[in-house]
Amino acid sequence: MGKGRMGNWADRGGRAVATARRVAMQAARQAVERTEPIRASALRSAERAWREYGRPYGARYGRRYAYAPTRWVVGVAAGSGLVLAVVSIAAAGPWQGGQRVSERALATGRPVAAAHPGGRPSAPKPAGPAWHDAADVLAPAGGSGTLPTASGLGGALAGPMGVPVLGHVTASVVDVSDGRTLYSSGADQAQEPASTNKIATATAALSLLGPDHRFTTEVVGDAATGLTLVGGGDPTLTASSGHDSLTALAAATAAALRAAQASPSAATGTSAKASTTASPSGGGHQRIQLHYDISLFSEPALHPIGVNGNIALVQALTADEGRLDPTSTEDAPRYSDPAAHAADVFAAALAADGVDVDTSPSQATAPANATQLAQVQSGPLSDIVERMLTNSDNDIAETLGHAVALASGKSATFTNAGAAVTARLAGLGIQLGSTHLADSSGLSPADGIPAAVLTQLLVLDASPAHPELRSVVSGLPIAGFTGTLDNRYGGDGSEAGLGIVRAKTGSLTSVNTLAGLVVDRSGRLLAFAFMSKGDGGQDAVRAALDVLASRLATCGCG
């Protein structure tokens, strides 16, 4: 009976090996069905993996595994899984800014560890269709490949550009290596950019503030004279999650108050006599007064389009972008006064940390030269820009526009933000033409940007001469995978752009835009902008824009 049962396990071991091969091949075939251009590469990779690893190791160890004791099998499986996880994490590197370090290195063209340890050379690339092999997608794109001709691109785009659903459409396609215009149709006409406006905002902010800039939210004052929560224009500040949350700031403030009470003479700006009149823990002393300061940004805080679920009041102090539900996205209900709500959250957190504080804070400007008790800082601007572009975050965009205005010596208003952004772009050499900006997010129908300006910006952002702008490129959504393009590029005529197109989307009533980068069939990196205004259904117009970008991917029109 025991022998028969072991024979049964041997059969199961053999079936497991066969099943593993079948699952691997099935996954490859499913990928092939989704995207024709990588068919040959996917099948070659799956077959090669089976020949090199599956067959020899399966035959050698399958029977030994089948007859092994149960606890030995469990131990080997657990140990192998742990080793695989550790090796995978070590190879990919730590998580930074929404991606693994190795992923960021590949995106910026920095060298990474060899794909074949021990110096084993890469297998020769097998012959296949004139398309990108899977590994080629990870290589830095540059000026290699055949430069498309104007006539070739014109022929490739003529049909898709004439689709009635697009209405009035303008377009610009340029070579990223030198900015040369390869295709132009009404490219100098200012069109409503919708959220492609964020490319301009991001470029101006990164160039003026720097990719390492961080926004600071601080608490100043002392227990005797009162505390002031000072908004620093951090658009990513949260109520309770992360090191840069109001909860974390409250904990740091409570700790500073306790330290000052324990050693009053050592607390800068707080005398021993003053510290006896107020105590962080109460105990018969007067309650600590709390104010909040939002004077960094000027009025009006209401966006020019009015009350809208796509954006909160633009104030120097907000938590979770003023959303009633911090997990909500896009069109979401907002607090009528996000700054007041954030101050209330901070007061409650202070009280929870044992500070006897006024839980109904009032708005006031912080005293000049007040002593800082505690602070929290946002992540670097490069990470914030990536988040803004990937998710098309309007709140971040308007806050960055206000920051650009401040850095330009202007007060932080919507009007000044638009003027400061355009001034900065002009200083970078962008030929703005008829560009005019009423905001920094693209929500305003009064915005106007020509397609040729968007492609100029993308060429600048992708330039090796401007590494400080790199997060504009790395923040662009990837077709079919991330951000506002995660559910696109699955329709007829657009599959070729899947994973190849990286672009910022834009959508308003009767307006749809798409601007980004694509590597064409010959390996040439192109920047493009397609801008549509018409009465077509939004889904149909988006699909038509996706087809246009995909035509660039398949063209190779040398």
Image (cartoon, grey):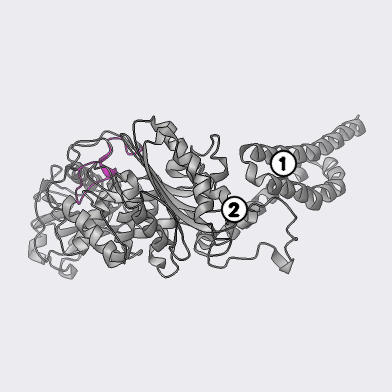
Q: Give x and y (percent) for residue 428.
A: 31, 66
Please state if 28 lies on the left or on the right of 429 as rendered: right
Q: Is 376 rendered above or below residue 352?
A: below
Which range is magenta? Answer: 311-327
- Which residue type does callout 2 highlight? Arg
Quadrant of the drawing holding the N terminus: top right
Residue 28 vs residue 284, the one in the foreground: 28
Identify the main secondary structure in magenta. Answer: loop
Image point (77%, 36%), residue name: 19
Q: Which residue is mark 1?
A: 24
Q: Give x and y (percent) for residue 237.
A: 29, 50
Residue neighbourhood size for the residue with mark 1, other residues' Cα within 10 Å, grouped as few (<14), some (14–19), many (≥20): some
Residue 521 - label:
2
Residue 155 - label:
none
- Which residue type does callout 1 highlight? Ala
Please state if 200 lies on the left or on the right of 27 as rendered: left
> Are dots 1 and 2 in contact, CB under 8 Å?
no
Q: Is 377 rendered above or below residue 241?
A: below
